[in-house]
Image (cartoon, rainbow, N blue to C red):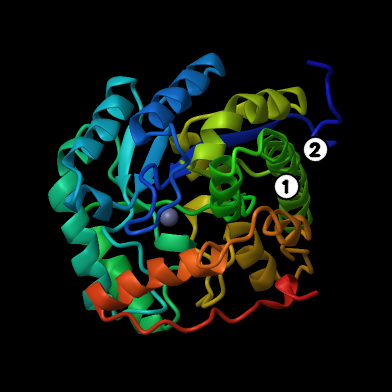
Amino acid sequence: MIPLQPISPLGPVRMAITFDDLLLFHGTPTMPPGYTSIDRARSFTHELKMHGAKGTYAFSNTAPTDVDRELLRVFDHWSEEGHCIGNHTHHHPSLNWVDAKAYVGDIERSAEIIEPWIARAPRRCFRYCMDMWGDTPEKFDAVQAYLKSAQYTPVPISVGFHDVRYLTPYWRTLKAGDKEGAAWLRRCYIDSALHELRLHCASARAVFGRDPVHIWLIHGTPIASDCLGEILDTFRSAMVEFVSLDEALADPMNALVPPRISPEFIHQVEKWAIVNGVPVDDRPPPILLEIEKMHPAPGESSADIVERMRAIVTDRLGAKIRPFPLADCQRG
Ligand SMILES: [Zn+2]
């Protein structure tokens, strides 16, 4: 591959790869024909091996295993390949929508299922759903205290790329048999991964005056399994080095918790930017509106699917769904 412009003028950027939600969300019909969770997991571990990424942590909601125990093979495969499983709650609520007791109960419910795999990982890790650590000091303190008592390390995200927004358009496009459209979505997805990495790494340099070790997030979706190899190739030719989660967690950006209650849907770089008064740009890329125009159908928009996911969280956990407030850096 032709070398690309490096992500940073300061030298190679180190980054730990992490996965969220290897299992698709409970009650959503977004699996395209011919795709399975175990095949996706195999494709991810193959690409991780090809790119020298070891001990990669995956955080997954576990509610789909209530109705399909076969899905647990995904966790078997992941750990047999030398990667690690962390806790990400059972139903995947935002902590904004439930109280600390319900949230901790949902962490414990997931642990009842995945503890055997968590116990095999060198570090017991937890990832907050949507990287939302609590919208009140009371919730933040209560859940952090629980995680400490259960010996979990909470793992933040420093770079994402709104990748989960491709889940529903990709499903609709493949279901319609539109191969060209699917190829266009994959191109947008890969380009967006690189664009967002450049953006968030630049924001981090503005905040810290250096390149911190990043924690990158990709969700375990069908489009991710079709594109991970090319994304990692692209990153490598833009001078990204894949490192362990331990190395990333040792960086103060990740080791310290930004001293601010953040009710917004924002990640670690933006939280530190707000704390330090550094203006950064975290507006969603306009391509997200374009991809949603692919093969519209009643009840099959991204908003419809999100609605179904939220209905389950409301039903099972008594969640009170409210829109997330926007941070200044997310406004147009
Ligand atoms: Zn998640």
Point out residue 74 in the picture as x, y percentages from the top left corner.
29, 33
The crowding category of the residue bearing disc 2, from other C-alpha atoms within 10 Å (few below 14, some 14 to 19, many at least 20), is: some
**Image coordinates for residue 287, horizontal then vertical, percent:** 76, 55
Q: Would you identify the image quadrant in which residue 321 lies?
A: bottom left
Q: Which mark is residue 201?
A: 1
Residue denoted by label 2 = 8
At horizontal 45% and vertical 50% (from top left) the residue drawn is 30
Q: Secondary structure at mark 2?
A: loop
State if disc 1 and disc 2 touch (CB < 8 Å): yes
Q: Quadrant of residue 289?
A: bottom right
Identify which residue is drawn at 42% across, 75% down. 134
Give amino acid for label 2.
Ser
Mark 1 crowdedness (10 Å alpha carbons): few <14, some 14-19, many ≥20: many
Which quarter of the rendered image does ligand 1 occupy? bottom left
Rendered location of residue 313, percent (x, y)? 32, 71
The amino acid at mark 1 is Cys
Q: Nearer the viewer, residue 290 or 321?
A: 290
